[in-house]
Image (spheres, coloured by chain):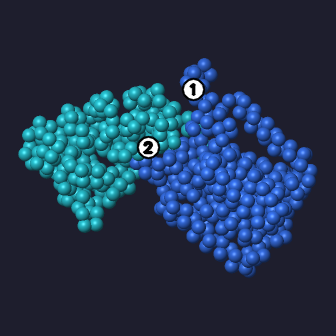
Chain colours: A blue, B cyan
Amino acid sequence: MNNMATPKMEKNIAARGYTPWSLLGVLVLIGILFAIPFFVTNRFYLSLVTEILVYGLLAMSLDVLLGYTGLLSFMHAVYMGIGAYTTGLFLIFIDPTASIWVLMLLGVFATAVIALPIGWVQVRTGGFAFALLTIAFGMMLYTVVWKARNITGGDDGLIGIPGLNIGLGSWVLGTTKDPTVIYFVILTIVLACFFLTWRIMRSPFGAVLESIRENEERTSFIGINVRRYKLMGWMLACSLAGVSGVLFTLLKCSVSPSMMDSGAGGSVLMMTLLGGMGTLWGPFVGAGIFIFAQDYISTMTEHWMIFLGFILILLVLFMPKGIAGLNAFSFRKSKR
Amino acid sequence: MAAILEIRNLHRHFGGIAAINGLSLTLSENVLQSVIGPNGAGKTTLFNVITGRLHASSGQVFYKGQEITNKPPNEIVRLGISRTFQKSSIFPGHTVFENLRIARQAKLGGSRRIFSSKDRLKQVNEDTRLILERLRLADQAKTIASTLSHGDQRVMEIGIALAGSPRLLLLDEPTAGMSPRETERTAELIRNLAKELTVVLVEHDMEVVMSISDRISVMHQGLLIAEGPPAEIQSNELVREAYLGKEA
């Protein structure tokens, strides 16, 4: 096959970022990520980095919707909440020694079951109406969780969720209460989700989503059932958010309804915008900046959101494509 | 010759205004049929109803004997009716190649594949290259569509429609805003297309219409007032009154 590659094809491959160098870069980055616990020995900061991974996954899942399909969701954190509550409730009331795989399956399943009928309604609209519906359904779900005291603990949320023992067969890595162990677990799952999503976005299916973002009407006039693909994009985004919810519960060992409120929804949106829509790594950068800023500025003032709002205003005015939009960082240079 | 499209007593109202007012039309296969008429005659509305962009108020549309009235656009496209729009409808942020590739993918299938790379749809990519060459856009394959010249965008949109392998192609003012040279090239392209499929052309450039059409329908206030070969239409009194006379 090699000798069949024409210069044209090679140019194509290079333009898409498939050079040996970028592969090396990715491997080095993965290596650094796995080495972080050996440098960051402060338990608090390691947990903060882990939190960035969890919220980065959530922001990335929102980007599947926003940056790839062109649909805006103001309340995406709600679907993280469903995954988080499912995991917490299962560990508290049903099986405190459940395997992480069972929890993942359950979390994604519960999120999908709830997201499907909502998505079915939402994809009948687009643009502004879609965004408004995400608020309406999101507030409904939030209120249900908040008011169902006897199950969800209402305002108090779920606390004292047991940790899990992580291992393979007879080999035991440790418990999720150990910051290093939970870091490795979450990093592995987040990386798996990242590469899975990356693969999906480059597939023929991903190309359909991007066409919907570019021109919904034209997409239906090339013979594509736009609603069906919008629904599939929605389900993918919500399922990934569900995974981030499972990871959240494992990391925090507690769940509170505030993770599902409109402020949380806005925060995720800010992470995605900050990092840059339309790339999968941008939202992780956005989540990193957001969470570090939150931690750092809130040591000085509790009104840290004012500063964040200010940064966001500057961003919208001067850097509408976020950090990923800066050309030096852009993997999608060829698409400029 | 078998009818590829048959319209029976079609109405379309906007509030109290009738844009299409009881129109009937039968279209034969492999002809280039132009639809002319003054602004507001209902030409674009006719396209919109045929292609499912607008619902009919009443009446029926048949494609190859099958009723398609009020079907969703994507189903109508799949049956073999593609169109372009008065205002180019393209994927502005995509490359020219991707604009056509996604349309070809939609036709040939594979959109449900979620794990394989889109580059591996070999037939889709091959066909896309052929269409690009036919449109003489091969050199601009990697250009972002929104940066193309207006004329090239309009030609590319014809390519998007062609990628669906239509049997019936509806072109809404394809040469609007084009330079004389681009218009000439596009007219030639349309003439060639009509050898393989049925083309319905809405066009204001009378020179183009008269030189390439097999037959011409004249629309006025939501109705067809004349139908025939170009020479006949040119000498038709009614047509002169309704349309040509005003311009001459």
Left or right: A68, with B66 as reference point:
right
Which residue is disc 1 drawn over? Answer: A9
Left or right: B72, with B217 as reference point:
right
Q: Position of residue B241 (x, y in %)?
A: 11, 48
Disc 2 secondary structure class = loop
Q: Position of residue A132 (x, y in %)?
A: 54, 66
Left or right: A148, with A187 as reference point:
left
Q: Position of residue A182 (x, y in %)?
A: 84, 55
Q: Amino acid at mark 1?
A: Met
Disc 1 secondary structure class = helix
> What residue appears at the point 42 percent right and 35 percent down from the top-left corner?
B149
Q: Nearer the viewer, mark 1 or mark 2?
A: 2
Q: Quadrant of residue A246?
A: bottom right
CA gap, disc 1 and disc 2: 25 Å
Q: Give the chain of mark 2.
A: B
Residue B90, numbered circle: 2
Q: How many marks?
A: 2
Q: Give the chain of mark 1.
A: A
Q: Position of residue B41 (x, y in %)?
A: 22, 53
Along the line of sight, the residue nearer the viewer: A123 or A49 = A49
> What residue appears at the point 50 percent right and 55 percent down from the top-left corner?
A228
